[in-house]
Amino acid sequence: MDTTDTICALATAPGTGAIALIRLSGSDSFPIIDKIFKPAKKGFSVKNAKTHTIHFGTIDDDQGTLDEVLVYVFKQPNSYTGDDSIEISCHGSPFIQQKIIELLIQHGARMANAGEFTLRAFLNGKFDLSQAEAVADLIASNSKYAHDLALDQMRGGFSKKIKDLRTELVDFASLIELELDFSEENVEFADRNRIMLILSKLKSEISALLNSFSIGNVIKKGIPVAIIGKPNVGKSTLLNTILQEEKAIVSEIPGTTRDSIEDTIIIEGVAFRFIDTAGLRVSDDKVETMGIERTLEKIAQARIILFVFDVTNCNIDQVKEVLDEHRHLIEDPSKRIILIGNKIDQLVEIPKGFKDLVELETIFVSAKRNENINLISDSLLKSVDIDKITDNTIVSNIRHYEALSNSLRSIEEIVLGFENDIPSDLIATDIRNALYHLGSITGEVTTDEILGNIFSKFCIGK
């Protein structure tokens, strides 16, 4: 993987804006910028500038001055990538951006690949691999807790946990490898009771990390909330009221919503992805039937289900009948079901029987008049264990989850090996596998294929 050349890219979003930022990084950064940057201070040269300084001047081409700019100087190893780096702050004209990049390429730079600046930071030891991945998560974060989770991982909170686990396993592995050197003497250097305690601790800690993925993944992507129910019970009106915008079409005609409609709202730092679905009913309309099929798919994906019914046109038995009819969809214990009795504005009082409707939590609202909608928000927040998010190391990356799963399987094989007196050389193989999978998380063991797959998902310029 060639990291000796000099790369450049637009670091801000493409398009017109007040300013734009262009990055340049690599061993030839200073010679290249000195060829096109005319500093306001006479006799000044970027290569002689101090690191972390800003300089005003113009970018010039053969036709004359292209733009007035600020040039930021970062000298290795004190830069984001660890290499000599330049950032050019110019006006946000797409023409200016393109011309500056063309000038950089003309004088020896090349366009950076997606994520290549962060890849170089990893290869130069500025980040480990899990921290580098957290950079992309931080950029993509759209809620307080997703931001906090990514920031903690970028600062090394998760990495430290993995390195601690790996250190314990390395110490244990060294004793087993030592036994292999003295296999003919039949000597045991590793106390088997202590080893079993270590393995039990490793299993427990890795299992806790794996269990945290269920909450880490939804915090990162937003907690999916499906709004379901029969046609015309007010699902779309409820969605519009929660989102405070006309996202879904509202009509008295049954079957208006024929496909799922999604949008995200942040409630006290937690992102919830609301999904308005087609009404649950038997229909001869082919398009509506396809919408209902998608509804069933969204129910399967949802972590929380808001089951909406019309209190003016439904008695207790009917509600129970609807729930029983779809029991197979909502009986998953990992899902939280909240019943929403809508249209209370059309009642003089809520029928007393609804107070203890079923064993499920029930909230009575008027989506049309925005009554009691705050109770839904409060209930949604109760479904999120905030203490778990703030007090524990959380896994939110599917690659990390898979690596931890593989390492746990190897550790379970080690335990099984000791219990069945399997030879140390076979146990050593399982130890090496566990070390490999843990090391792949932080990048202590990796391949070009893994790196290419991870960094290709980054935006260009980061």
Image: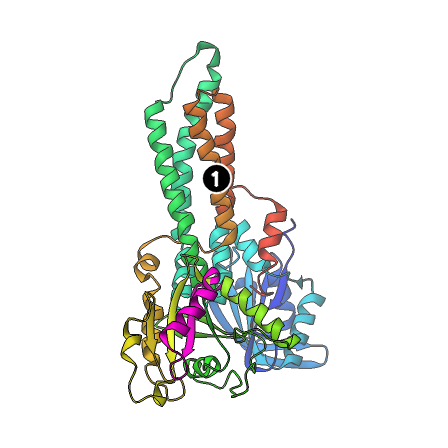
Q: Which residue is mark 1?
A: 407
Quadrant for the C terminus, please: bottom right
Asked whether the viewer can see residue 358, the reply is yes
**Quarter occupied by residue 7:** bottom right
Residue in front for this viewpoint, 387 or 346: 346
Colouring chosen for the image of the structure: rainbow
Q: Position of residue 207 (x, y in %)?
A: 40, 44
SS for dot 1:
helix
Mark 1, Cα crowd under 10 Å, few <14 / some 14-19 / many 20+, is many
**Quarter occupied by residue 290:** bottom right
Q: Is residue 164 above or below residue 399?
A: above
**Quarter occupied by residue 459:** bottom right
Asked whether the viewer can see residue 127, the reply is no
User: Magenta residues?
Assistant: 301-329
Residue in front for this viewpoint, 14 or 205: 205
Q: Position of residue 109 (x, y in %)?
A: 67, 62
Q: Residue at x 30, y 89 (%)?
A: 348
**Residue 354 located within the stretch drawn in magenta:** no
Q: Position of residue 433 (x, y in %)?
A: 52, 34
Q: Position of residue 216 (x, y in %)?
A: 42, 58
Q: Residue at x 39, y 40 (%)?
A: 165
Badge 1 amino acid: Ser
Q: Is residue 403 above or below residue 41?
A: above
Q: Residue at x 48, y 10 (%)?
A: 184
Q: Is residue 188 above or below residue 67?
A: above
Q: How many marks?
A: 1
**Residue 313 located within the stretch drawn in magenta:** yes
